[in-house]
Image (cartoon, rainbow, N blue to C red):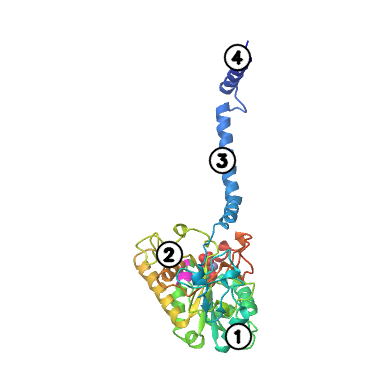
Amino acid sequence: MPLGALGSHGGYRKQEGQRQRGQGEPTWGLPRAKKRLLWTLLLFAFGCSGLYLYGFRVLRHLEGIIPMGICPTATTSLLTDNFTGILRPWARPEVLTCTSWGAPIIWDSTFDPHVAKQEAKRQNLTIGLTVFAVGRYLEKYLKRFLESAEQHFMVDQSVVFYVFTDRPEAVPHMTLGPGRLLRVEPVQGESRWQDVSMARMRTLYEALGGQLGQEADYVFCLDVDQRFTGNFGPEALADLVAQLHSWHYHWPRWLLPYERDKRSAAALSWGEGDFYYHAALFGGNVAALRKLTAHCALGQQLDRERGIEAVWHDESHLNKFFWLYKPTKLLSPEFCWDLQIGWRTEIHHPRLLWEPKEYALVRN
Ligand code: UDP
Ligand code: MN
């Protein structure tokens, strides 16, 4: 008998035996076919939870190798700035250092912090920093935010901190350096956290038209759920400053989470949008910020009248504004980084770090 026939004969017998067992003998009280289905479902469930727990992290690492694009040499030589003087984009060849409209993207080592510091001093500037701490965000974040800001934000410059809160009496007492002061402004609480977040635009618009606008030349508007971890100096100053969102700076444009509902004032259609900017940090001179906050507050108002809300609230409207009116300076994700993303070679010295999101504790 040829060996092959023996093999196939033996194989046939084996299959036959399996088939009989599969159909006949129940295992743990279940027929074999059902047992296999159970195992498949179990493995699928394990696979899904594994992907959920670790997969995103792996994807985040892989995302880091998507190239950001290169600043053309013709633009590179023109990249100067009121505060940093000549920039050195070639110091960071692995990242994008300018925009298509010729604005610099500030990365570590592309500027001289001493030049910026001296220039801000020479211009005798006062720099505002606004932050909102409404409801439970106050006890959770405000103290660390302010202490770290006093240590790292615009060191040796004239600074005015503006804290907007529904509980002025609970704002921690701070000892501030010379030329630095803190003002506490009362605002009303809202029942939804989204409303607190969006209401900031109108409040800022009014404040910029009042005392804040009179005493500050440039202002940065920040979320409270972060802390300064490195020097955040005048290299960040410009007429209109936008922050690259640390979660999205490698993503292709069509994936960016802009508002896509055409009924919303914040809507961007496919093909629109330059970058995805983070609403946790924006800044500029007083006139530019008046325009920005007016635009966003109006967009939010129009949406409310139509009974809709943009997907990422004030951030969606901010992204629409920066599409229409291009920022004159972009800050790299080093300026506002989320440690959850994990280690990236291009992130040298983070200036601000997101605090862990504890929504269950702080949100209604
Ligand atoms: N905020 C607040 N109280 C609230 C909701 C929001 O003070 O109940 C302020 C706070 O400064 C916060 C910012 O609005 O940092 C934006 O909200 P959040 O940080 O929760 O939004 P996310 O960063 O998650 O988009
Ligand atoms: Mn935040």
Determine which residue is flagged by label 1. Answer: 118
**What label sits on residue 283 in the rendered view?**
none
Amino acid found under the numbered disc labelled 3: Phe
In the image, residue 206 lies in the stretch drawn in magenta: no
Q: How far apart are labels 4 and 1 at the CA level? A: 90 Å
Camera-near label (4 vs 3) is 4
SS of the residue under disc 4: helix
CA–CA distance in space, label 2 to label 1: 35 Å
Q: Earlier in the sequence, mark 2 or mark 4?
A: 4
Q: Which residue is mark 3?
A: 44
* Of the pair 247 and 27, the residue shown nearer to us: 247
Return the residue at label 4: 5
Residue type at numbered disc 1: Gln
Task: Name the secondary structure under disc 1.
Answer: helix
10 Å crowding of disc 1: few (<14), some (14-19), many (20+): some
Residue 224 lies in what quarter of the image? bottom right
- Give me the C-alpha separation between circle 3 and circle 2: 38 Å
**Which residue position holds label 2?**
273
Pointer 4 or 1: first along the chain: 4
| Magenta part of the chain | 194-198
Check the image and report above or below for 302 versus 169. Answer: above
Label pair 3/1, CB-CB below 8 angstroms: no
Q: In the image, residue 252 lies at what x, y percent?
A: 48, 58
Residue 364 visible to an observer of this rendering? no
Upstream in sequence: badge 4 or badge 3: 4
Find residue 256 and report its horizontal and vertical position in percent: 47, 60
